Structure formats: C-alpha cells, structure tokens
C-alpha cells in the first residue's frame, strides 16, 4: 500500500497564536495511521512554537519550512539557512511557483537550495508546473502544481495530474509525486485514488482546521 501525504502550505498566513490554535484542533484528531503522513508548513515565525506543542502533545504531525536559503549560515541578512531550519523542520518546500514568479527563483537558485536542504538532512519537496522544469536526482518528493490551479479555485483534473506524475516517474521511478492546486475536501479523494499520486499539497483549504480534517478523512477512506 502507498503512503499518503497530506501537506498544508500556509504561505504567508497565520500568526503564532493562530498557528497554535489550528494545531490544537487538528493534532488530537490525527490518530496514528501507518500509511498516513500529515505535514504542516507554517511561516518561519511559528515553526518553533509549533514544534514545542507537537512534541509535548505527541501530535502525529511533521513540520516543514516553505523556503530555504541557497547559502550556508553566514552574512546573508534575512535568509534562513538549512543548518538553522534543520532544528525546526524535517521537510522544506523548494521551487514553489509563487517563489519562481515573485522572487525570480531560477533553476540555478533552486538547485542550490536543494543542495543546502540535503546537506542538513532536510527533505526537499520540489514544486513543478511543467515537465520542462528540472527535477534533480537529489529530490524524492515532487509536487505537480499547474499555474492555472494554484490559488484560483480551479483544480486540474485527477487524470491530468496522474498523467503528469506517471511521466515524471518514467524518468525516475523513485519519485513520490503529489498534486497541488485548489484542492479541497470535495476533490481530494479523486486525486488520492490515482495510483501514481501519493498525496496533496494544500494551500487555501489547509488554513481552516475543520476543512483540513475533512481532507484527512478523505485520505483515511483509501488507507
Ligand atoms: P492552493 O495552493 O491550494 O491555495 O491552490 C496550493 C499551493 O500553492 O501549494
């Protein structure tokens, strides 16, 4: 049976108290399940408090960061290095379309970020929107996030997403491929039912704790 990953990407939302409120609603309702992985990627400012709460309350939730510096620790004002992040998170999103577009992230910068993540044992989750974007052999987790679907309310079809995942896996069978872009509890299961898709990267619908729990419930129907 495949593992199913349900990943919340909060983007630039939720202050510390809102983050803690969310985790105390969602955390207690995630029963340990062998093949279910729940990941939350909050803002940098909330990572530390969330980590403490998850540890103390023994919630079955893994933390991820939304970005990483392309450089080692050092004189890089405003950057969070892999070394610093590795104390707080296990996963890091790299190459999200909002970063490629708004922060001019090139394939070269993305490649440096992947190297930094690997150097400090962070698992890189690479986002791509087309087959032309590079998927380094250092990456195992990849999210297909078509540009027209991110934050628009118009998801891709599960068939297209599965086809995209299949093509990626033909190039590298070790990849674990997710879909992201306007996922909610109504369409989640149709994506998760596809054998080539192993999970969902969820923006807007992850912000509401009850909606996120409904998506996890959809995943549990498959497990
Ligand atoms: P969305 O965002 O679910 O709000 O479309 C997904 C993402 O950007 O990862």
Image: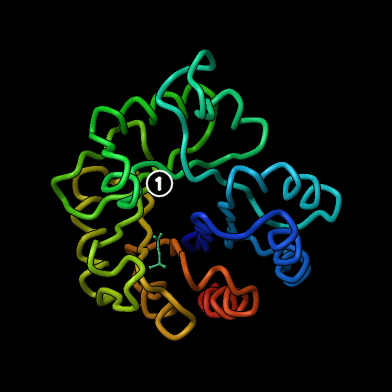
- Tell me residue 193's x, y (percent): 39, 75
Q: Which residue is mark 1?
A: 141
Name the outermost residue toward the bottom: 186
Q: How are the colours assigned in the image?
A: rainbow
In this view, the residue farthest toward the left is: 132
User: Which residue is nearer to you in this view: 23 or 13?
Assistant: 13
**What residue is at 34 percent from the left and 78 percent from the top?**
153
Q: Residue furthest right?
A: 56
Residue appearing at x 51%, y 23% in the figure: 77
Q: Residue at x 60, y 74 (%)?
A: 208
Number of numbered labels in the structure image = 1
Q: Residue 154: image x %, image y %?
A: 29, 78
137 displayed left or right of 94:
left
**Of residues 123 and 21, the one drawn nearer to the viewer in this rendering:** 21
Give ligand 1's quarter of the image. Answer: bottom left
**Residue 116 position within the rendered picture, expressed as x and y whole percent measured from the top left:** 44, 24
Q: List x then y, in percent, for residue 212.
A: 58, 73
Q: Residue at x 30, y 33 (%)?
A: 137
In the picture shown, does residue 81 fall above or below 18? above
Name the outermost residue toward the front. Answer: 77
Rendered position, 185 above or below 67: below
Label 1 CB-ligand 1 distance < 8 A: no
What secondary structure is marked by label 1? strand
Residue neighbourhood size for the residue with mark 1, other residues' Cα within 10 Å, grouped as few (<14), some (14–19), many (≥20): some
Tell me the quarter of the image containing the C terminus.
bottom right
Q: Is residue 147 left or right of residue 11?
A: left
* 180 with respect to 89 (left or right): left
């Amino acid at each position: 049976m495949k593992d199913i990953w349900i990943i919340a990407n909060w983007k630039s939302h939720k202050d510390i108290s809102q983050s803690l409120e969310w985790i105390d609603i969602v955390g207690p309702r995630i029963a340990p399940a062998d093949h279910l992985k729940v990941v939350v990627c909050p803002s940098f400012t909330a990572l530390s408090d969330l980590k403490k709460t998850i540890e103390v309350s023994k919630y079955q939730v893994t933390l991820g960061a939304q970005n990483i510096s392309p450089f080692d620790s050092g004189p890089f004002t405003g950057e969070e290095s892999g070394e610093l992040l590795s104390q707080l998170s296990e996963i890091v999103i790299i190459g999200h379309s909002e970063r490629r577009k708004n922060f001019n992230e090139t394939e070269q910068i993305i490649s440096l970020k992947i190297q930094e993540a690997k150097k400090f044992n962070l698992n890189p989750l690479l986002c791509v929107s087309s087959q032309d974007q590079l998927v380094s052999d250092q990456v195992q987790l990849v999210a297909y996030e078509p540009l027209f679907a991110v934050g628009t309310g118009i998801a891709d079809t599960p068939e297209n997403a599965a086809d995209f995942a299949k093509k990626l896996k033909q190039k590298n069978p070790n990849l674990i491929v997710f879909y992201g872009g306007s996922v909610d509890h109504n369409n989640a299961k149709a994506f998760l039912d596809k054998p080539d898709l192993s999970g969902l990267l969820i923006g807007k619908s992850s912000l509401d704790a009850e909606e996120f729990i409904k998506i996890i419930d959809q995943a549990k129907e498959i497990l």
